[in-house]
Image (cartoon, rainbow, N blue to C red):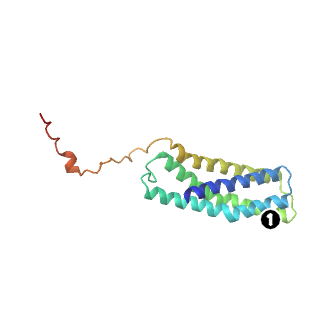
Amino acid sequence: MHVAGSVGLLGVDATVAVLGVAGARGSDPRTVYPAADLLGGALLVPLALVALVTGVVLGALTPWGLLRHWWVAVKLALTGAGAVLAVVVLTPALGAAAQAATAGDVLPTAQRLELVRDAGAASGVLGTTVALPVYKPFGRLRGRRRQVSGGASPARRAAPAPAPRR
């Protein structure tokens, strides 16, 4: 579910970015921006929350942990920031662009390019969050090492080894 949510989020955000580029290049804003707003409202925020919640659950319930490895901590931070930005920045901007386009207002070039920048940056960040678990860079966080016991109790590990046979 986490992989589907994360990759789905990347696909939706890339689609919103492509629609933003189409709008910036002169495509009919009455078509482009309502479509981008529909995708943003219906899929962007729910998929961002699915990716975040399932990622936290996986981190908490698996040996990778939430704060044992750098790549997990970085992915958690990026996913959390992306979810907040999707709710606070991108979705409202898409809604405003769609309202302006359906009202027949001309979107200023700066606003059109801002949508492209925001969606493109989000796609880059999401691409990073999809790549991090594949490559698992950076190693472990300092001070978070656990010793592997190998199944033996501490008393058994401390016992001296038997004398060799002759």
- State left or right for residue 57 relative to residue 86: left
Residue 86's image quarter?
Answer: bottom right
Residue occupying image coordinates x 69% and y 65%: 42
Between residues 33 and 99, which one lies in front from this camera angle?
33
Question: Left of 148 or right of it: where is 156?
Answer: left
Numbered-mark total: 1
Classify the position of the N terminus by image quarter: bottom right
Q: Which residue is the extreme one toward the top? A: 166
Residue 110 at least partly seen: no
Relative side of 12 to 162, left or right: right
Q: Position of residue 100 (x, y in %)?
A: 82, 63
Which residue lies at the image location 15% right of the left edge and 41% below the top edge?
A: 162
Question: Which amino acid does the dot numbered 1 rest on?
Answer: Gln
Residue that label 1 marks: 99
Residue 93 is at least partly visible in this image? yes
Name the residue located 72 percent from the left edge and 49 percent from the top edge: 117
Q: Position of residue 18 (x, y in %)?
A: 76, 51
Whole-percent x, y for residue 49 in the image: 59, 62
Q: Is residue 40 left or right of residue 139?
A: right
Q: Secondary structure at mark 1?
A: helix
Residue in the picture at 57% in, 51% down: 78
Q: Residue furthest left?
A: 166
The answer to which image quadrant residue 92 occupies is bottom right
Q: Position of residue 112 (x, y in %)?
A: 79, 53
How packed mark 1 is, by other alpha carbons closer than 10 Å (few <14, some 14-19, many 20 or more), is some
Towards the viewer: 116 or 50: 50
Q: Quadrant of the C terminus?
A: top left
**Residue situated in front as seen by the camera: 158 or 49:** 158
Is residue 103 or residue 149 the one in the foreground?
149
